[in-house]
Image: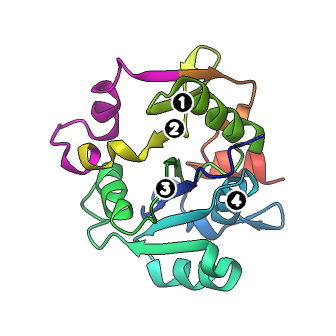
Amino acid sequence: MLKEKQIWNGLVLSAGLSSRMGAFKPLLPLRGKTVLGCTVDSLLAAGVSEVTVVTGYRGEELEAYLSAHYGSNVRMIRNQQYRDSDMLASVCVGLTQMAPCAAFFLLPGDMPFVSRETLQALIQARLATGSPLVFPELDGRRKHPPLIDASLIPQIQSYCGTEGLRGLWDSYQSVIRTVPVSDTGVGIDLDTGNDYAMYAS
C-alpha cells in the first residue's frame, strides 16, 4: 500500500514542435484517447494527485483538450520560448506551476505506455530507500520517468550546466537509485511516424 499522507505529482513535457513526427504528436489518436491523454492517464492511474503539463507549440489546442478532459486534475503552463529552449527549460517552467508535493514523476508527453505498476514500484523504492532520485531500469539501462524528490527543485531550477537534463542527472549520480522493471513502456517514446505506426494499431 502507498502511504496516504505522501503527495505525488506528475510533470509532463509537451512543448515541442513534433518535427520528427510530421504531425502534431500530442493529439494523435491512440487507444481511444490521444498520445498525451494516455501519458497523463498513466500517471493518474498510479495515484498521482495532480499532473502539470508544460505546453508550447500549439499550446492553445493542447490546453483546450486538457481542460475539456481533465479539469482540475491537470495544471497547465506554457513555455513561451519552446522554439529555442531544451527540455530542462520546460522542466523549470513547469516547476513554477506545480503544486506542493513529496516528489514528482517527470515524463515526456510522448511516452504513453509506462505502466501503473512501474510508477508504483518507483514510489515504493523511494519510500524504502529515501533516495531523492529513482529511475526505472530496463535491460540494465536507466529509463524514464524518474521520481524526483521535491527537495531537489531549487537545485534543478538553478542548474547551470551545458548538457541539459543529461548533465543534471550526471550531477546526481551518487544518489540515484534504479528499480529493475520488465515494463517495455519505459523505453518507448513515439518520436517518429514509424514509431507511431508501430504502436497505434
Q: CA distance from mark 3 to mark 2?
A: 15 Å
* Region in magenta: 156-177
Query: Of callouts 2 and 1, which one flags the residue occurring earlier in the amino acid sequence?
Result: 1
What number is the disc on residue 101?
3
Residue behind mark 4: 44
Q: Amino acid at mark 1?
A: Phe
Residue type at mark 4 is: Leu
Looking at the picture, the colour scheme in use is rainbow
Q: Are marks 2 and 1 in contact (CB under 8 Å)?
A: yes
Q: Mark 1 = which residue?
A: 135
Circle 3 residues within 10 Å: few <14, some 14–19, many ≥20: some
Q: Position of residue 128 (x, y in %)?
A: 60, 25
* Placement of 79 over or under 48, stated as above or below: below
Classify 10 Å Cα crowding around label 4: few (below 14), some (14-19), many (20 and above): some
- Find numbered disc 4 in the image and state the secondary structure of the residue it sits on: helix
The span from disc 3 to disc 4 (Cα, nearest Å) is 15 Å
Task: Tell whether label 4 touches label 2 (CB within 8 Å).
Answer: no
Dot 2 crowding, Cα within 10 Å, few <14, some 14–19, many 20+:
many
Q: Looking at the image, is mark 4 or mark 1 earlier in the sequence?
A: 4
Instruction: Calculate the distance from the C-alpha at mark 2 to the C-alpha at mark 4.
Output: 16 Å
Q: CA distance from mark 2 to mark 1?
A: 4 Å
Of marks 3 and 4, the one in the foreground: 3
Find disc 2 in the rendering and name its residue. 146
In-image side of 122 versus 105 (left or right): right
